[in-house]
Image (cartoon, helix red, strand yellow):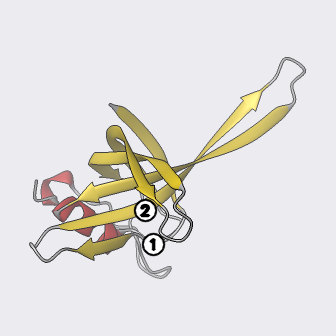
């Protein structure tokens, strides 16, 4: 189990399936700053591909946009496939999101910030 906080690099995308299921994918950027003995610093950004199924994913798509801060909790997974064009085997690590917490939801600049109460989440 891991917990990661980061900013969305693009708007989340949800795909619906004929059986009624849905999966939402998004990528978050997690920034870390390292300080060395000589007091110099280096910032490293990790990009984490995320996948969440069902209503949780739909809520993320409805409430989050590129740049919003989110905290996700889940387990590591891996997608493996063969490229249709050249037959190359490919893979991608992903975080299979099991829970999330709102850090910043989308809002208009003129609207006051609305902090969502966790009791509003239907699960």
Lateral position of residue 67 relative to residue 122, left or right: right
Total numbered labels placed on residues in the image: 2
- Of residue 62 and residue 12, the one placed in the foreground of this image is 12
Are the two marked residues, 1 and 2, in contact with CB atoms closer than 8 angstroms? yes
In whole angstroms, how far apart are the C-alphas of marks 1 and 2? 7 Å
Drawn side of residue 34 relative to residue 19, left or right: right
> What is the number of the mark on residue 26?
2
At 42% from the left and 47% from the top, the residue drawn is 94
Disc 1 crowd rating (10 Å Cα; few below 14, some 14-19, many 20+) is some
**Residue designated by label 1:** 11
Q: For numbered disc 2, what is the local secondary structure?
A: strand
Residue at figure coordinates x 48%, y 49% from the top left: 91
How far across and down, in percent of the image, does residue 45 sit? 65, 46
Mark carried by residue 93: none
Please tell me in which quadrant of the rendered image residue 121 appears. bottom left
Q: Is residue 48 above or below residue 25?
A: above
* 72 w.r.t. 38: above or below: below
- Foreground residue, 25 or 123? 25
Q: Position of residue 21 (x, y in %)?
A: 14, 68
């Amino acid at each position: 189990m891991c917990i990661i906080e980061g900013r969305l690099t693009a708007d989340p995308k949800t795909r619906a399936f004929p059986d009624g299921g849905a999966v939402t994918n998004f990528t978050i950027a997690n920034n870390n700053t390292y300080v060395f003995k000589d007091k110099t610093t280096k910032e490293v950004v990790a990009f984490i591909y995320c996948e969440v199924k069902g209503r949780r994913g739909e809520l993320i798509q409805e409430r989050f946009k590129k740049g919003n801060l989110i905290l996700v909790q889940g387990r590591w997974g891996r997608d493996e496939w063969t490229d249709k064009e050249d037959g190359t085997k490919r893979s991608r690590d992903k975080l299979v999101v099991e829970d999330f917490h709102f850090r910043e939801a989308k809002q208009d600049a003129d609207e006051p910030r609305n902090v969502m109460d966790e009791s509003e989440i239907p699960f």
